[in-house]
Amino acid sequence: MRHFDVQIIGGAVLHDGSIAEMKTGEGKTLVSTLAAYLNALSGEGVHVVTVNDYLAQRDAEWMGRVHRFLGLSVGLIQRDMKNQERRSNYRCDITYTNNTELGFDYLRDNLAGSSEQLVMRWPKPFHFGVVDEVDSVLIDEGRNPLLISGQASQDAVRFPVAARIADLLIRGLHYSVELKDNSVELTEEGILLAETALDTNDLWDENDPWARFVLNALRAKEFYRRDVQYIIRNGKALIINELTGRVEEKRRWSDGIHQAVEAKEGLKIQADSVVVAQITYQSLFKLYPKLSGMTGTAKTEEKEFLKIFQMPVIEVPTNMLSIREDLPIMAFATARGKWNYVRAEIEYMFGLGRPVLVGTTSVENSEHLSALLREIKIPHNILNARPKYAAREAEIVAQAGRKYAITLSTNMAGRGTDIILGGNPKMLAREILEDNLLSTLSDNVPDVEIDSGLTSGQILSKVKVGPSSLGLLAKAVLMSKYVCKSEGKKLSYDEARKIISESIEISQSVGSVELLKLVDEETEMYPLGPCVALAYLSVLKDCESHCSSEGLEVKNLGGLHVIGTSLHESRRIDNQLRGRAGRQGDPGSTRFVVSLQDDMFQKFNFDTEWAVKLISRLTDDDDVPIVGHSIMKQLTNLQVSAEKYFFSIRKNLIEFDEVLEVQRKHVYDLRQLILSGDSDSCSQHIFQYMQAVVSEIILKNVDPTKHPRSWKLGKILKEFVGISSAVLNDSFAGITEENLLYSLTAVHGLSSVDIDEFHLPNLPRPPNSFRGIRMKSSSFKRWLTICSDDSVTDGKFRSSINLLCKYLGDFLIASYLDIIQDSGYNSAYVKEIERAVLVKTLDSFWKDHLVNMNKLNSAVNLRYFGHRNPLEEYKIDGCRFFISMLSATRRVTVESLLRYWSSPMESEELVLR
């Protein structure tokens, strides 16, 4: 393969840290190699991020050959990989992964208990990233933050009860809905009925909170539809990704929504969860010092990319001029009229022999259209979230450009396979190979469940395999039988497919002559791989010949015809579907067909009455479409309004998350420093914590403008002893409020102080633990920190406060060092305990802080009614929460360590478990 000139332009755009908008079929995958290779030369690692595991694996295998040939290592991250595999793959020069795995690896690394559990390149996990389908990742997925959850103590019995209450409530009488943002509001009648049914006086009682359960049950009833937002499989409600049409088995809706859906469907209620780590994709990808992206549709969102990521969108010209014809939108008053028209158009195109791709928005719609086509006996393939179809995805897409092929797909974003007119020869050759070999190599080849009736594959012209190919296939089958017999067993289905994949890989890098030599050589290893590779090359030539001649026929007929059955809330998603036709200068056409009963028109309160009245004036038949400039303008304006609305939601989410982003960065940086730092840095953290705790006790009980006699010295001593009593020696017991006041009065006005030898006069000296240059340096740094503390206002007695902080801090730290030395444990064990306590305490308070911040996020919106800015309120309270969290973390860490070393045997299990 050679880069087209326009692909070189695309590579330059990526290297510049911009977004390259390249139309479907222009070779974005090959373009990514240019920027990835160049930026990987620094040795700091490059991530090529795709939208799913399949694309990551395909690109790593396909493009990895280029990078390895040029001397770079290539890694791949997949869903079920163990930590050791992930770590070695992230250490490679170029790593292929998907956005979900990347985000969760980052979050999991920041929940790790030791540096050995980390998988990314710390302390700099991010260097340069290339994001494929960047608009899908950063904009469409931008509303769904990545969450890692732990189980919360929640009463699962409440969800089915709330579901039954929701069934009793009537929309419009007991509650109202806002389709635009999926919200529900109870009326007075609804509240009264719910309270009566639940036998409670207050639905919003904090001690018995039923309101959240009832509202979630209503949301599940109104907005979460089976075969649209989720499917039921093996007794579980599995989410369907609205952007890709794929099932996401490991994802669950948060805030009790998933449990509400399970209750609605009568399924077993899974445990409710509480967030222990979270990040948005916007915050995640902002961590890259340099980021770029590729997509076919980003220009409509350029302002958003510029505002949030400072990434301009550069349109890269197509290699060949596009001759695709985009036909006018057809709008119908009713859904029945729309589906009848779509069926008629498919029937007409099928009669011509043109391939047709139909885009639908849900499993429900694709199966409804399938039923309509079965009525008129038109063979077709379905590609949606159901396993029986998803398993055949690559095969279905490979056939979608062939003559007479009709394909119904829920969504084409991120499918990763171009629709080639006449068929995809490589995919067809692979199918022929698997059809011949899988049953020989493996006993457990799965039976793909297919609906009754004709599928496209049953009427498409068969590839004529030549005699030489048949001979090589027969030899490969014979060889596979021999291998299985000599092994004494057959392989698993996955192992058999892996052998075929590896053989195809061999055929790409080794020529036919070399393969013939390998097959003819008598070696201890059975030459199955080279034999299968040789058969593949021969079958591929037959497939290329067949697809080429059939492709010419399809081009003469007009190419691929794309039908969109509804408009999306973003023009960009519609353009993704349109882009499937007319790739690389091929002919093609597109048509969007909508009805005024579509969800989008209802959601955005689109005024459809005028259109219905217009139709009624023209004809009594409501199946007659509205076509013309007026309706086009109205629909475009509606989509622009929808884009603005969702942009405002994402902007609001980002602005709120920026508050948490700063806090998250501080906590995660601190955590990595504790895990990855040496033993001295760990000790310094503890000394800083101890000094900070002492300073907090002092500062809240003194006034630098007033004489020490007005300070609350008794309270200072009581709190200090309360924390430190486990390690303080007997000499400290003699310090009273009176002699402390005397000492502070005596040091007031001193012109100079010897920091190394300083202690308050007439009071016991701290234990002599500050020996050696490191300890003296540490003590001096703490003194500078005390003096520069801007939380203390300047006053006449500021220096006395500083000296008191220094004295009590020295006493606590020196006593702590003494008790550790007396314990007799070696330094390695001591550092292990210190690190474990630091990390566990920080994690515990950070989890609580996330819960509090999520509650605050929900609560501040109500302050809008008090004429206060919710974002400003969130910033102020969020900052206050964070300061309190850090303070509590320091105090509990110090108390835990002091308690541990006063009785280490009793506390060991608690700390290390």
Image (cartoon, rainbow, N blue to C red):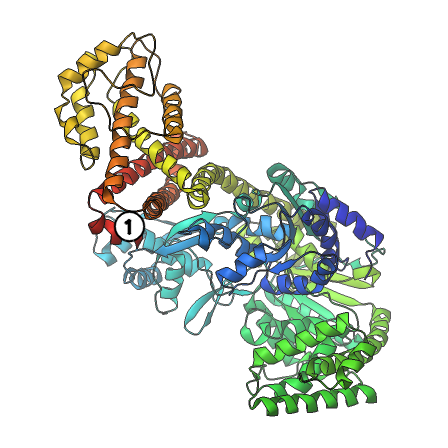
Between 91 and 276, the residue placed more toward the observer is: 91
> For this view, does 347 lie left or right of residue 79?
right
> For this view, does 59 lie left or right of residue 252?
right
Tell me where residue 504 sits by quadrant.
Answer: bottom right
Whether residue 184 can be seen here:
no
Between 846 and 298, the residue placed more toward the observer is: 846
Residue at 67 percent across and 67 percent down: it is 358
Whole-percent x, y for residue 441 in the image: 62, 86
- Determine crowd level at label 1: few under 14, some 14-19, many 20+ residues with C-alpha closer than 10 A: some
Above or below, 764 relative to 282? above
Whether residue 837 can be seen here:
yes
Which quadrant holds the C terminus? bottom left
Between 534 and 351, the residue placed more toward the observer is: 534
Q: What element carries label 1?
A: helix
Residue at 56 percent across and 63 percent down: it is 78
Whole-percent x, y for residue 631 in the image: 69, 51
Residue at 78 percent across and 62 percent down: it is 589
